[in-house]
Amino acid sequence: MPGSTQPLAYEMQVGFCEDDFRESAVTLLGLQLCDVSAAKCGDPVCRTMGTNYFGDMLRRMLVGPLLLKGRRFSIPRGVSRWFSSGSSSSSSRAVMSWGDGSHGTLGLPSSPLGSDAYEPTLVQGLPSDVLSIGVGHYHSLAVTTQGEVWAWGRNHEAQLGRGLSDPRELWNEPKQVQGLDGVRIRAAFASGVISAAIGDDGSLWVWGRSKRGQLGLGKGVIDAVLPSRVEALAGEEIVKVSLGWGHALALTKDGKLFGWGYSADARLGQVGEALEMKQEGLSPATGHHLGSALEVVEKLVLDRIEKEKNMPIIWEPCLLPEFNDVKVSDVACGLDHSLILCSNGTLLSGGSNTYGQLGRVTEDLGLVPVDMNFFEPLSISSGLGHSFAVCKLPSSEVIGEATGIVSWGWNRNSQLGRTGTENIPGLVQGFSTETPVSVSGARAHSIALTSKGELWAWGCGKNGRLGLGSFADEIEPTLVECLQGFEVLQAVSGFDHNLVLVKE
């Protein structure tokens, strides 16, 4: 192939952003097409788009006419950034958002196609007593001290908990989730297609649509327009839930771990091994006998539909047997991998290792220890294809005891915040005088909160997702200066947007 040293990337994943292939983004041969959110064909964070000869050819043939669809508007720097008058009480809290505003994910006034925000911008219409926040790939959640859940953003799968009657133009308006009367919620989480909330009694509630069993409501149940209790977890006190592309993990107060949903690549450990499908790749020879690029697309979509008839799915939460003799202290799901931190300090990973996100040299299938070397993990988190651990640093790194962030996995846009070997954990640069307390990974950028209540960001800057007032990438953590004057209490990232909970 002219000028190419890389093998053809015959990759297809239906439901990359959404759950139904008819409405979803399709990553095909390194190209992402989306008939809902418009083609993101020029997005540098789309999977390897244009890095191979066939991908370039297909782009020229199919995507050019789509480039005019879905153009976004930008909110000028600094506009609507601060608290409105009358809401600046010292006890008042507020939610701010920035980055890619498609699907109304930022909760900001916008055109129907969505607007981007290049700096943290106040989300209007929320109560002043927000207790915590959560994000899905393209929607956002806020929980109040009264136990209410508010939601905004993408609602194609009913993940906002307001039914499906609202037109798309109203997705950006924060509204209270319906169907939780009498339930006091203390935390909320989300994936691309569902939302989940934990009641103050430890019960788990879910809503949205997932044909991969991510709701956990029983065999064949793929829809919950309004919140439904996960009865399989009745009697358990859930303290944390993490959601990937199609799988889910739930941690109990006493350290037990449950998993369910799409179980390919052992992302759920032993419980999914019996359901594993053999991966069938497209023969490289196919690329040399094309009738047309459209015929190839159609064939691959049909092949994928056929495969999905036998998807490995765990329809209800199951106890993961690997942890019968050890308690779990933290969990995190990437798009298609899992991280599990045990109370004895052992960190395990399982699932896809396409980008080195499992953090280990061994390619063994299953939940296997990450190569942490001398780092002692305290908490974990994950982006789409990269992973993080807030760690107690070895004495050789600093004088005295301190914490730092360790990263590994996909680093195409410097979302690891460091150089060096990508598939083995390494220390994120730039925090030598800071104490990180949490970190959140997105699709191609990352953010971290320090003990000073300050926010740092790095990686891909497209759509203003770093909150620095520009679209420039940052290879190392950079302070989000426009948040000075606020104490950041919590910071989370969706695919391409961010939320912070702040007080003055």
Image (tube, rainbow, N blue to C red):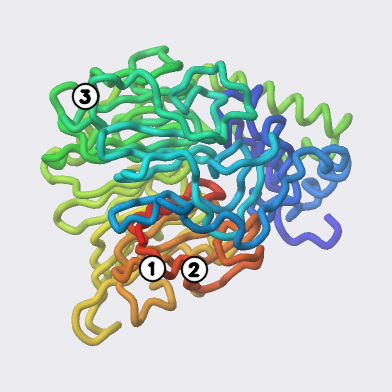
Q: Quadrant of residue 429?
A: bottom left
Give SS at disc 1: loop
Depth check: 339 or 496 in front? 496
Using the image as rendered, state which of residue 280 and residue 340 is in the foreground.
Answer: 340
- Could you tell me residue 318's position as x and y percent? 25, 27
Q: Quadrant of residue 273?
A: top left
Residue at screen point 77% across, 47% down = 55
Say if residue 425 shows up in the picture: no
Which of the two marks, 3 or 2, is nearer to us in this view? 2
- Residue 185: give x, y in percent of width and height: 26, 32
Q: Residue at x 82, y 38 (%)?
A: 66
Tag 2 secondary structure: loop
For badge 2, the amino acid type reads: Val
| Three-letter amino acid code at the position of disc 1 | Glu
Q: Which residue is mark 1?
A: 454
Q: Could you say which is closer to the camera, residue 467 or residue 306?
A: 467
Q: Which quadrant would residue 428 be assigned to in this image?
A: bottom left
Mark 2 vs 1: CB contact within 8 A: yes
Tell me the residue that label 2 is attached to: 480
On the image, the x and y values in percent for residue 340 come to 28, 48
Which disc number belongs to residue 233? 3
Q: CA distance from mark 1 to mark 3?
A: 37 Å
